[in-house]
Image (cartoon, rainbow, N blue to C red):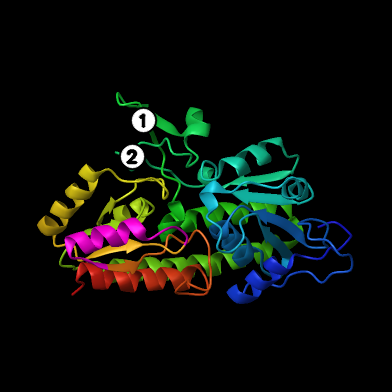
Amino acid sequence: MNVRRRRISGIAVTAATALGLGTLSACSSDSSAAGNTDKFDVVASFYPMEYLAEQIGGDHVNVTTLTEPGQEPHDLELSAKQTAQMGEADAVLYLKSLQPAVDEAIAQSDVKTKIDAATLTKLEDHGDVEHDHGHGGEEHADEHAEEEHAEGGKHALDPHVWLDPVKYAEIAQGVAESFEKADPDHADDYRKNAEALAKKLGGLDTAYKDGLKNTATKVFFTNHAAFGYLAERYGLTQEAINGLDPESEPSPARIKELQQEAKADGVTTVFYETLVSDKTAKTLAKDAGLKTDVLDPLEGITDKSKGEDYVGVMEANLKVLETALGAK
């Protein structure tokens, strides 16, 4: 919200255009910095945070994201330029424990308004997952580890809260309040925009409740354990091949266990996602005689996404879940 305008990167403009997001600032000097526009400058850590900032901020914000479209967010490494640009923003919106490099940069940054989405709702432990593959929990074990296990792994709180529309709405409300406090001149608009977003998310919650209320099975298989909150919200059971880390490899014993469970629970489909390899999911499906489909954890929007924004992809996720679970 500073006086100078700067050029937003072509990637950000392309992403904003593709997603139908709010207006990005016009430009006079040739730079891709996040700060120094006449709007309320917000740096978002990855897509779910970017979406909230755009929806709540509307025309009053200039939003840039640290995670480019198509980039897997868990393993993000920040450039020195990105870290420097963060210091020029009016606010940074992130989800602590998901991206260790972002957490570290924000801790060292002098940005006045730091909004940690993890503090705006209740994170939960979705259990039975060793969290030692660099997914973000180990670096912040002091805050996010729940218990030590004899086998040496740690249970960490699951960060994937945005996949539960109810919890995402709670976060949205907290983000709106932070925007109102940091940029009081536009507080009324932030409040109105947040109310409009809450209605969208409420509609999504209702659609999921109705669509998944009566199904042939309640069990679904995923590539990694991103859907614990969604499963808990709508009375389903998520069985993940790789645990919380999308890049880890399952043991042969785990694969055998899933094959047996598929038969016992009437599982029809193994879900994979767009930003990580589908190799393990397809191998399991082939060996067990199951179908495959995409269940998108919404960590980023690409041209492969089955929707242009959060709501569109969540609606697509509901359709594939209804089909896989045998909704009646």
Residue at image mark 2: 129
Give the vertical position of 148 relative to 130 (above or below).
above
Res. 234 in view = no
Helix, strand or loop at label 2? It is loop
Residue at image mark 1: 153
Number of callouts: 2
> For this rendering, which residue is in front, 129 or 114?
129
Q: Residue at x 36, y 40 (%)?
A: 125
Reading the chain from its start, which is encountered first: label 1 or label 2?
2
Disc 1 vs disc 2: Cβ atoms closer than 8 Å?
yes
Q: Residue at x 67, y 41 (%)?
A: 106
Query: Quarter-wise, where is residue 288 in the image?
Result: bottom left
Helix, strand or loop at label 1? It is loop
- The percent position of residue 20, horizontal first and vertical second, equals 61, 76
User: Which quarter shows the N terminus?
Assistant: bottom right
- Kind of residue indicated by mark 2: Val
For the record, the magenta segment spans: 275-291
Res. 169 in view = yes
Which class describes the residues within 10 Å of circle 2: few (<14), some (14-19), or many (20+)? some
Indicate whether residue 279 is drawn in magenta. yes
Residue 133, which numbered label? none
User: Which quarter shows the C terminus?
Assistant: bottom left
Q: Residue at x 42, y 48 (%)?
A: 247
